Amino acid sequence: MRSSEAGGLRLLAAALLILLCAVPGDLHSTEKLLLVEQKFGDDEDGEGGRGSDTSQLDSSLDLEGRAVELIEIPVVYRERVENISEVYGNSNRPVKVYVKMYHDSPVLLCTTQELSEKELVDPYFIWVGPSGRNIKGEPYVRISETGSLLLKSFDKFMSGDYTCTVSYKDVENNKELFLDMKFSIYGFREPDYSFKFSTRYHTHECHDPSNTRFFRKFKSVGKELIADLTSRITDVEMKCHVVKVPHKGLITELFITFKVDPFGYGWEEVCRKLIRDCEDETNRRVKEAQNRIEAFFKKQSIALDEMKGSTPNFYYIANSLNVVQVDHCRPGFGKNKLTHLDCSECCVVCDHGMYSPSNDVYCRPCTSVKINYYGATAC
């Protein structure tokens, strides 16, 4: 089950199951039926009473109490070699810097690009953080002898305005010069991906009782297909409509919609192990879930073509699959293309006076109380 070949067999078995449960009569061998039953089991007991024209899964297709082995996705982790970039200061305006959560910041230079080309006599550097205090000696701070600043393992409380003051001597005129530079530093996270799917299946008629049986099998296959990815399928709905198709007349179709997100059983454990790259890993897994589901529908088209005239009652309507990616931000983070143009697709820590209590894409203004910190999750 860990190889790509095993994954392909799982997909083929899943596609075969949809066709087998729909085709009337015994068009396939007993061996193939047993293969599918052993793979997925029979989940028909205990469900009933649902109409044939509209059905909905209560909340999510999680494990429903059944023991499912979580299979690690084989991944080669290479040591990350981070090319720490350098950011020059500006004495005329704040320089915006975006730092990925739990990663080190770029090196912030206490100098302008122009000043860096000059010789400085007896330079002295002071860094003041968002609290207005000198940050030298803080455990998350590293300041070099030339005044450059690096913030280690960035957390959202470290967001805010940092001011560096460099002083040096003008020997010829016997005076001391000062230059202030401000950096506005924001923590950000990658958005969490989810996907909305919509597709269609042919059916005999809307009030056919076998529609409900087909829908149960469809949900079961989807759940098993991505169970090892710590992703889940939610909001599964089926509606039946009669469609007038050009040059084909009236055709009865099942319209099926569902969502896939990376927050299935076991995702918290994944993030505990990979706290620095949580979103990267969960997004990789949900993208793999998307790929499997798309391959699942493609295999159904291929299987249907190979049936050569033995068309089942239910079959996937070719090219009807539509997939839309939806981004979500963690509580305390949100997107803002106006304020954060240079990181417009990032989930940036909510600014002062703003908050985000859930997985919304945007931070909201708080008018009831004054929020004077970054990353608020409540108002």
Image (tube, grey):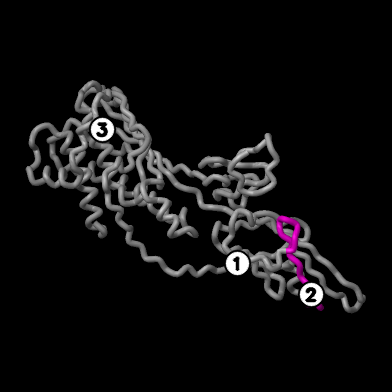
Q: In terms of sequence position, does the residue under pointer 3 or pointer 2 come before the other?
A: 2
Q: Residue at x 74, y 74 (%)?
A: 117
Measure how far apart labels 3 and 1 are at the Cα level: 53 Å
x and y percentages locating residue 318 in the rendered image: 27, 38
Magenta segment range? 119-134
Vertical side of 72 occupied by 201: above or below = above
**Residue tagged by mark 1?**
85
- Residue 164 location, quadrant: bottom right
What residue is pinned by disc 2? 123
Separation (CA) of disc 3 from disc 2: 73 Å
Quick one: label 2 or label 1, which is nearer the N terminus? 1
Residue placed most toward the observer, 63 or 313: 63
Q: Residue at x 88, y 78 (%)?
A: 171
Residue shown at 59% from the left, 49% from the top: 348
Residue 215, numbered circle: 3
Task: Give the number of the mark in front: 2 or 1.
Answer: 2
Which residue is painted at 28% across and 37% down in the image? 219
Q: Which of marks 3 and 1 is nearer the N terminus?
A: 1
Along the horizontal axis of the image, is 78 left or right of 156? left
Q: Position of residue 300 (x, y in %)?
A: 23, 42
Residue 131 among those drawn in magenta: yes
Q: Position of residue 231 (x, y in %)?
A: 36, 47
